[in-house]
Amino acid sequence: MTATVHKTPRAEERTGPAGLPNPAPRPEGEIEALKHVWRAPKGLNFITVVNNTYVGLFYVGTAFLFFILAGILALIMRTQLAVPQADIVSQGTYNQLFTMHGTMMMFLFAVPAVEAMGVYLLPNMQAARDLPFPRLSAYAFWAYFFGGLAFFCSLLFQVAPDTGWFMYPPLTGTKYSPGINADFWLLGIGFIEISAIAGAIEIIVGVLKTRAPGMSLDKLPVYAWAMLVFAALIVFAFPAVILCTLLLEIERAFGWPFFIAEKGGSAMLWQHLFWFFGHPEVYIIFLPAAGMVSMMVPTIAQTPLVGYRLVVLAIVATGFFSFGVWVHHMFATGIPQLSLSFFSAASMAVSVPSGIQVFAWIATIANGRLQLTTPALFILGFLFIFTLGGLTGVMVGMVPFDWQVHDTYFVVAHFHYVLIGGMVFPLFAAFYYWTPLASRKPLSEKLGRWVFGLMFVGMNVTFFPMHLTGLIGMPRRVYTYPAGLGWDWLNMTSTIGAFMIAAGVALFLFDLVRRFRITEDNAGNIWNAGTLEWLPSGDYANRSIPRVTSREPLWDQPHLAADVEAGRYYLPNAPTGGRETIVTSPITAEPQYVVQMPGPSWATVLGAFFTAAFFILLTVKLVIPAIVCAVIAVGMVIWWLWDTDPGPAQATVDIGGGIRLPTYVTGPMSHSWWAMVVLLMVAGTLYACLLFSYLFLWTVSPDVWPKPDALPELPWPLLPAVLYAASSLAVVLASRSLRRVPAGGAGAAGVWPMRIALAAAIPLVVAAVATDLAAQSGTGLQPTESAYGAVVYMFVSLQGFYAVVLVLMGVFTLARSLAGKLDGVRRGTFDNTMLLWHFAVVQGLVGLAVTALFPRLVGG
Amino acid sequence: MARSSIIDDVFSGLQSALAPAGPNASGIAELSWIMFAAAAVIFVVVMVFLAAAILLPPGRRGWLSGQGVVIAGGIVFPVVVLTALLVYGLALARTLVREDTPDTLRIHVIGEQFWWRVRYEREGEGDEIVTANEIHVPTGRPIRFLLTTRDVIHSFWIPSLAGKLDMIPGQTNGLTLAVERPGVYRGQCAEFCGGAHALMAFDVVAHAPADFAAWREAQLRRAVEPATPLLARGRELFLAAGCGACHAVRGTPATGSIGPDLTHVGSRRSIAAGSFPNNQGTLAGWIADSQHLKPSNRMPSFPVFSGEDLRAVAAYLESLK
Amino acid sequence: MRGARPGFLTKMLFLNAGLVLWAAHFGFVYGLTGVVCARGLGTAWPAAVPFVVAFATVVAAGLSLVVLFAAVLGRGPGIAGEPDPALRVFWRSVTGGVAVFGFVAIVWSGLPAVLIRPCA
């Protein structure tokens, strides 16, 4: 497994003539070659571009578009609520408006926006040429773009979801929501979540594996730490919401009663799964924003961040604690008080790290000399608003207080303080701060003051009164309210404030249109910042990849920018003739190999388009066209993947400083192995959530659990278990024989044992799922009869899904072998198939054990 | 409507959590004020630190610029304050959840789209009482609400009396509270429950124990017989139009149980779950056009009645005191 | 990756040990209370809950202190044997800080068990 691991050089001493890795001036034509390799496609083909700087900008722009659209929805709502008993919009429209406002702000603006900033900034900050899977980020963006627009359009046809962004069943079940409104949410958002996960995998591998040499974890920019934890939160939180949307959609489509109390289901199961995602979601949005603030504050104060280690600690702790607070959205559901108290305690704990960060920023400002630029204003506004939101957050963490304010305008005020304060203001600060990286001209400082003033005052005028509105009794999500309860003037004030925010955003847009011009010849380091994203750059990112020795290399390493630009650092060229960047070790960031990366392809754009089309067509119940789109989408992905496992272009390349690195690596060192492992963490979390659902439904409705004699007889589950084990064994054998296939020896007879073993594994895994299904249905169990039946068939269905994926991947791997693209060295594709295979088998065995043994244990 | 002052809205609002009228709500109000005061102090201190970090001359702000202030302000201080708050909150929470005592009045409230069905358990000789959208309670006696739902999730909330508690399919949630002084307290559904969620309110009317007994007495009676020909015609039309398929009026052939029990509808303060005041005009309007007044409620509009007939039905209903 | 030196996973796990302990403690006490109360397991079980929670709290908090002391003493994966002094200091302080956080949060989670009756 570690055959291809090379001893990593750990050598500051191995440097070029000028003390730097490579001599300058660089050979004639080198820069032109580099530019040619990394150039963005021209004309219509431009949309196939995969460079992170372009995809990142598309991504940020689209997220901002959804911010404006969802903001307009908010203005309509505020207009309706300005006076009691208004008749601007109907009840039905209003219900769609608030559902879409919440859903879009969360799923189409906030998460994509911070992910987009990560795609744009991270490689630059780490001096990588791109993220390790450029096509994956392009696919994630386009899937989000097409899916998001289609989702928004449901509003234009008055079929938008109208049951609130948290979609509580049974209101969202077919009995009370027979239309397709809820399906739009479940399929539309379910799909966008997948795009978020794709981005998270990219970011985790990007942060851990593609950094500037020498950027060990203690020198990692705080923003990269924040994005690492952000991505980890997505990995562990999003599967819960994917599972619950899946369960609800299956309930709606096929009548499997997961959430229907009469059949042993539970509305509370949804709430647990949804909020297990929903609370970390808040930190998923906040952490990247806080990370950006930790990058901007040192620059505007012109001094390094005070308490770097404490801030990293705070980010890590926030990540953990955010998983211990989900029930704090369910304090009023009648859960026993002791259980609530655990979550109350965790809600206290999660506020401490925010305090650390606030004081670290204050200390940094005190240590330096604040320049009152527009980003600085937005950061000060952020500190003001977010501190208030944090304090009300501690209040709602207190169980008795929450019983009063839960689902009232107090909570509306609280989370807008946290989200606008904690995310929108830092994002606007970031827009002003990083625009000089992307645009020829920075944004206007003069207008920026007005934008800030309007947004800051407007925000407080809108949301501060809402604390009181809620305390004196106004619940959320009401399209109108009676006069005489004291709510009138408070609502009028909030409406006035909302239009002030809108005016601020409109002014920002005006400035953006006037001054923002994407260019390679950007405004540059106008703030005198210390981090690597401010190095001179082009489509190829940096001319050469620096070795860094501190957290603010531009401040501490004189001439760094000039030396990087002159190509004196690592990899100033494109030695394999394609796109490459340096892969480094995860902790110490020592160079390990040079990764060859794919370039632009229509496969990503079209694959995303047809994936989105599949989901949307399924929503409107056009099943046949949906299936056609799914087949095309899978075809596109296969086309895209076909040339992403290139094998070694040459044995090693010289990146300078005497370091020679391999150009292709497989096994635990490779970026593709890491990505697969992260994907398996996502899959494992999804499965853990399903196991939780099984146990939870049992605690709620033990009466629908079968007596042991109604289960499949014990020998029955053993048959699929043996088949699963046999399929894994076949894959192990295939792996061993593949190791003996020499590079380029695909035609030799020696490849056949591998092909036969892998081909044998495919029917084995299919048979395992089929026999499992036969055993369950043999007892007469129906998925529609009870929550027990539903959850048991869910186990089987999930295995069925994996079996389909494994068949596709198995056949794909065999096809590569037959095409001569698979051998003992070039085996990345095989390794990925193998990892997923073993995972699915272990999961299948766990499922068999649970479904066969648990009812016997508790029902005996 | 006279414009009330801010102070009135907050401290004696009909639906204000800061105008407590019972021990549950006052315990929480006390906690709220403590937290508001503490939060205000902490907020001001943090902002003063921030201002000092920006405005003090560089030589005089060194104390703010080290890791020490981050540890003191970001870790030590919050841990101390939050520990105290947690202990206080837990102790308070413990007092808010109480067991039944023998004199507890037990009232079942069933949430429905978009109204409240109310059922008093039988006490002594009396039968159980079924009513809707208005809950009468005695002061000075523990009252246990047993909360369930017939359809989706609702949330039962009377801010002046207690925090809210959800009504969830498949489970019964119990909320015990007491009312200190007679009065009217408004409650409202706090969990989005579909279309007309905004129009799902109710009144709690608290009486001195003797008055409550009288109310109970009155509720146990069957519906009054029509006293005038107009009211008799109203009852006739009510029954002929099939209203009894959904509504019950005890003492008449109307025994439906889909909608609210109307035996004493005329005695209630409001109609359509706290949405409109109760009088002949609103009753007539409601019968004729309920789908416009409260879209997606389950009662169809009855445009079939002539103006005169409508008046008769409304007058009949209003007479059901 | 393999061999005498601890791998990435071990180092990361140790760095986060304090909070991993908190998560395990949290999951255990919540799961226990949830199952005991939801399944109405008589009176003996609910009566035992506070003691089990208290015991779990002492164990988990104790372990987090062990991690803290290890970090203070410069022991443990990622710290001992790390040649880069800056990285060693970093790993040490973050490990210790995480352990302190874990300790406080574990004690906070245990507090309700003494103050609140289970299953009410």
Image: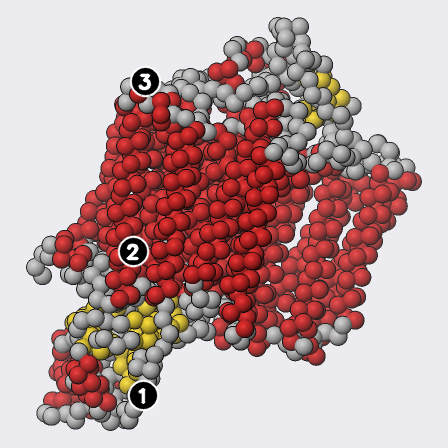
What residue is at 42 percent from the left and 30 percent from the top?
B68
Q: The residue tagged with tag 2: helix, strand or loop?
A: helix
Q: The residue tagged with tag 1: helix, strand or loop?
A: loop
Depth check, mark 2 against mark 1: the one in front is 2
Judge if badges 3 and 1 mark residues of a common chain: yes
> Is residue A31 placed above or below A215 in the rendered structure?
above
What residue is at 41 percent from the left and 57 percent from the top?
A329
Residue B247 position within the rendered picture, expressed as x and y whole percent measured from the top left: 29, 84
Q: The residue tagged with tag 3: helix, strand or loop?
A: helix
Q: Amino acid at mark 2?
A: Leu
Judge if badges 2 and 1 mark residues of a common chain: yes
Q: Residue B31 got which mark? A: 2
**Front-lying residue, A824 or A360:** A360
Q: Amino acid at mark 1?
A: Arg
Residue at the outermost left position: B2
Disc 3 from disc 2: Cα separation:
42 Å
Other-residue count near label 3 (Cα within 10 Å), few / some / many at <14 / 14–19 / ≥20: few
> Is residue A418 placed above or below A724 in the rendered structure?
above
Q: Amino acid at mark 3?
A: Gly
Question: What colour-coding does the image apply?
Answer: secondary structure
Position of the N terminus of chain B, as image quadrant, is bottom left
